[in-house]
């Protein structure tokens, strides 16, 4: 067996998986709290990428160093996307909170189309180049041919943000309130938790991670247009379901699992079937383990 | 004028016309124009009719071909094969000397056996199916457009002869255009036997990352990548190859020969090869053909107009040079002598494809596509 090739594919899968995991968290958190599949989440990721591009363009004119631009782009993209996520929830989902489950779902699809067309009108429908904001680190040069600096930054950034998120959920008061709302919203409200605030926080956190992903992934792939959110969104949603929708560690595991599967399938079989493997995996999971890797089977409440 | 005078002049007029028309008709060159002139695909066929009208008007105004006027027999096949056979039969029985058409490959293929049997030259400005010429079944068929496999042929020959490729990775985007190109490329590489195809794979358009495919290019030690598809994926693949320090040459098609590719791939685009149509927009005859259309119809011409204009000119010039409408004489002239047309100076090879039309190779140099001579 060719171990080097195996490791190369593994590292490629790790990068890809981290990307999926970052976006998948947004899906899974929202689902965990209000049981809504937020189809517009991929568009938030796309908006993050566009915000990053604009910041990078403006700062590039003034000749800031690449790393400063990257940090600023991420920070501003997070602020913008958090605002978009917050507003989106207030506009498209909150008025439908008491409605049948299908209504917010349709509203989410509408939101997704709205945001895509908003970018076409406000920006462009063309492909745009995204500058390389992550310099080639010298210490990475010996292995740059299998694992580049960009890959390293993506993997580290997602690992750090996931650890931070887990600590936040586990140990802060707000995190506790989020868990309580996820378990039983009515009970949480009776105990004095402001559910509206919790839901808004969820959207803000999910959108921030999507924004981070948008900037990092665009600098990795070097291009963006208004449609990038769609494919990334579908894959991340698959990852969330694989891991067990509603579970945050599940989203991370699902993302990595999906990324590695795709990478190995493309490497050892053929990239012709990359998507076939990804979605076959989804179908198999939905049949044999619908609650995903870490998901709990839903308990019928009596 | 009195009433009887009027009658007289009408009668005289009629008599003159009556004497004139048969004599005149016997001495015309008849050019059939066949293609879709109505229906969904009319926009592909009508510019060819216009081209024929423009060319014929110009020739007739200048005294015709060796003193003979040119007459058009316009027939609509709607791009439907069953209509095309009827049209072909009608053109043969009406005594057409040459046919400009047909437009769609399917209709052309249906009509060709009839022209072959009737020894009637047919020249298409738009039927790109490779088999129409390469099968050798239709010796009366010519075309002024490059066949579908021409780009792949050019890409493969360029990679092997100019770049010295030995191990070629053929990739595509799974779409009709890209996959078709890649399949022809693989076929030509294997037939040539000078290089081997080390991998043949489709990538998923829009995926955020192509590292698995890129690692495979390294694993199989490919020295050249031939890619069929469009620029968004091409720029991602090239960028990731360069990031992973893979120096293999990148050869691609017209879908990549787009300025957006250079804009998006930036410095990674440098050195990439892509084929594109030969630039004819500066040829005086091209400008003249467009101007004549604008003058006659008051609008810019549509699809395949320059190629149709070229076909009409090529056929009529061959008749003039042969001083006959005899099939063998005209074909010999088409195959042996160059003629100036809006798509360049062309003549036809044994199979019926035009030499001098089609594609040339471009390379990105200093942020611009430069034609390689």
Image (cartoon, coloured by chain):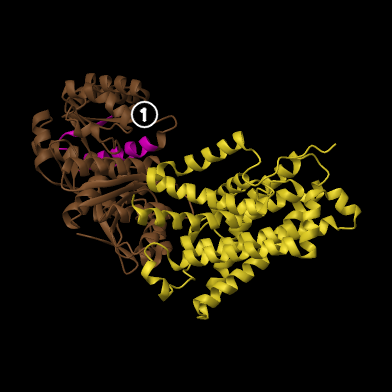
Main secondary structure found in the magenta portion:
helix
Whether residue A151 is situated above or below residue A283 in the rendered picture: below
- Identify which residue is drawn at 18% across, 56% down: B164
Q: Secondary structure at mark 1?
A: loop
Res. B282 image quadrant: bottom left
Please indicate whether residue A31 sits to the left or right of residue A219 in the image: right
Q: Position of residue B359 (x, y in %)?
A: 25, 50
Whether residue B298 is situated above or below residue B80 in the rendered picture: below
Colour yellow maps to chain:
A
* Marker count (numbered): 1
Res. B179 image quadrant: top left
Was residue B53 drawn as part of the magenta stretch in this picture?
Answer: yes
Quarter that holds the N terminus of chain B: top left
Please indicate whether residue A180 sits to the left or right of residue B308 in the image: right
Q: What shade has chain B been given?
A: brown
Name the residue carrying label 1. Answer: B79
Quarter that holds the C terminus of chain B: bottom left
Residue B344 visible from this viewpoint: no
Q: Position of residue B326 (x, y in %)?
A: 11, 28
- Identify which residue is drawn at 38% across, 54% down: B234
Chain for mark 1? B
Whether residue A48 is situated above or below residue B344 in the rendered picture: below
Q: Position of residue B322 (x, y in %)?
A: 9, 36
- Identify which residue is drawn at 83% across, 50% down: A185
Q: Nearer the viewer, residue B215 or A7?
A: A7
Q: Position of residue B232 (x, y in %)?
A: 43, 54
Was residue B254 drawn as part of the magenta stretch in this picture?
Answer: no
- Residue range in magenta is B44-73
Residue B351 visible from this viewpoint: yes
């Amino acid at each position: 067996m060719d171990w080097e090739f195996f490791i190369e594919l593994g590292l490629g899968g790790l990068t890809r998986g981290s990307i999926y995991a970052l976006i998948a968290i947004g899906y899974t958190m929202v689902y965990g709290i209000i049981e809504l599949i937020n189809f517009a989440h991929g568009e938030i990721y796309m908006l993050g990428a566009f915000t990053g591009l604009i910041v990078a363009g403006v700062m590039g004119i003034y000749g800031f160093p690449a790393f400063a631009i990257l940090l600023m782009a991420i920070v501003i993209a997070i602020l913008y996307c958090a605002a978009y996520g917050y507003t989106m929830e207030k506009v498209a989902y909150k008025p439908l909170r008491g409605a049948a489950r299908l209504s917010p779902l349709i509203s989410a699809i509408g939101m997704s189309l709205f945001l895509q067309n908003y970018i076409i009108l406000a920006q462009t429908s063309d492909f745009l180049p995204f500058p390389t904001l992550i310099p080639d680190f010298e210490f990475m040069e010996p292995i740059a041919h299998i694992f580049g600096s960009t890959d390293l930054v993506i993997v580290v950034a997602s690992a750090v943000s996931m650890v931070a998120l887990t600590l936040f959920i586990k140990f802060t008061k707000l995190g506790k309130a989020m868990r309580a709302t996820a378990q039983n919203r009515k009970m949480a409200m009776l105990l004095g938790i402001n559910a509206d605030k919790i839901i808004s926080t969820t959207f803000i956190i999910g959108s921030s991670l999507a924004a981070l992903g948008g900037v990092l992934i665009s600098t990795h792939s070097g291009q963006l247009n208004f449609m990038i959110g769609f494919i990334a969104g579908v894959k991340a949603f698959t990852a969330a379901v694989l891991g067990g929708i509603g579970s945050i560690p599940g989203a991370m595991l699902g993302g990595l699992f999906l990324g590695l599967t795709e990478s190995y399938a493309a490497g050892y079989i053929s990239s012709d079937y990359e998507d076939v493997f990804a979605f076959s995996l989804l179908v198999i999971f939905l049949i044999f383990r619908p609650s995903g890797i870490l998901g709990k089977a839903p308990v019928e409440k009596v | 004028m009195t009433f009887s005078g009027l009658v007289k002049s009408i009668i005289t007029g009629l008599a003159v016309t009556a004497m004139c028309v048969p004599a005149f008709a016997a001495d015309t060159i008849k050019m059939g124009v066949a293609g879709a002139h109505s229906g969904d695909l009319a926009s592909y066929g009508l510019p060819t009719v216009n081209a024929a009208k423009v060319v014929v008007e110009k020739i007739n105004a200048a005294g015709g071909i060796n003193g003979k006027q040119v007459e058009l027999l316009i027939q609509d096949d709607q791009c439907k094969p069953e209509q095309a056979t009827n049209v072909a039969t009608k053109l043969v029985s009406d005594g057409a000397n040459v046919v400009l058409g047909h437009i769609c490959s399917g209709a052309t293929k249906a009509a060709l056996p009839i022209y072959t049997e009737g020894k009637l030259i047919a020249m298409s400005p738009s039927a790109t199916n490779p088999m129409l010429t390469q099968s050798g079944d239709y010796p009366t068929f010519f075309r002024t457009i490059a066949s579908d496999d021409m780009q792949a042929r050019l890409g493969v020959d360029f990679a092997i002869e100019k770049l010295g490729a030995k191990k070629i990775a053929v990739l595509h985007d799974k779409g009709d255009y890209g996959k078709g190109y890649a399949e022809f490329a693989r076929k030509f590489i294997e037939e040539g036997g000078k290089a081997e195809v080390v991998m043949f794979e489709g990538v998923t358009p829009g995926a955020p990352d192509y590292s698995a495919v890129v690692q495979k290019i390294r694993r199989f030690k490919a020295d050249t990548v031939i890619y069929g598809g469009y620029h968004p994926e091409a720029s991602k693949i090239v960028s990731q190859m360069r990031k992973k320090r893979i120096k293999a040459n990148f050869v691609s098609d017209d879908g990549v020969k787009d300025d957006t590719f250079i804009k998006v791939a930036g410095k990674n685009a440098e050195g990439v090869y892509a084929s594109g149509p030969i630039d004819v927009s500066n040829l005086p005859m091209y400008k003249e053909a467009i101007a004549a259309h604008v003058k006659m119809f008051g609008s810019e011409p549509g699809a395949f107009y320059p190629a149709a204009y070229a076909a009409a000119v090529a056929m009529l010039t061959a008749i003039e040079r042969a001083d006959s409408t005899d099939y063998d004489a005209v074909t010999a002239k088409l195959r042996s002598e160059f003629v100036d047309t809006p798509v360049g100076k062309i003549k036809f090879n044994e199979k019926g494809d035009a030499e001098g039309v089609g594609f040339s190779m471009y390379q990105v140099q200093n942020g611009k596509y430069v034609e390689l001579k």
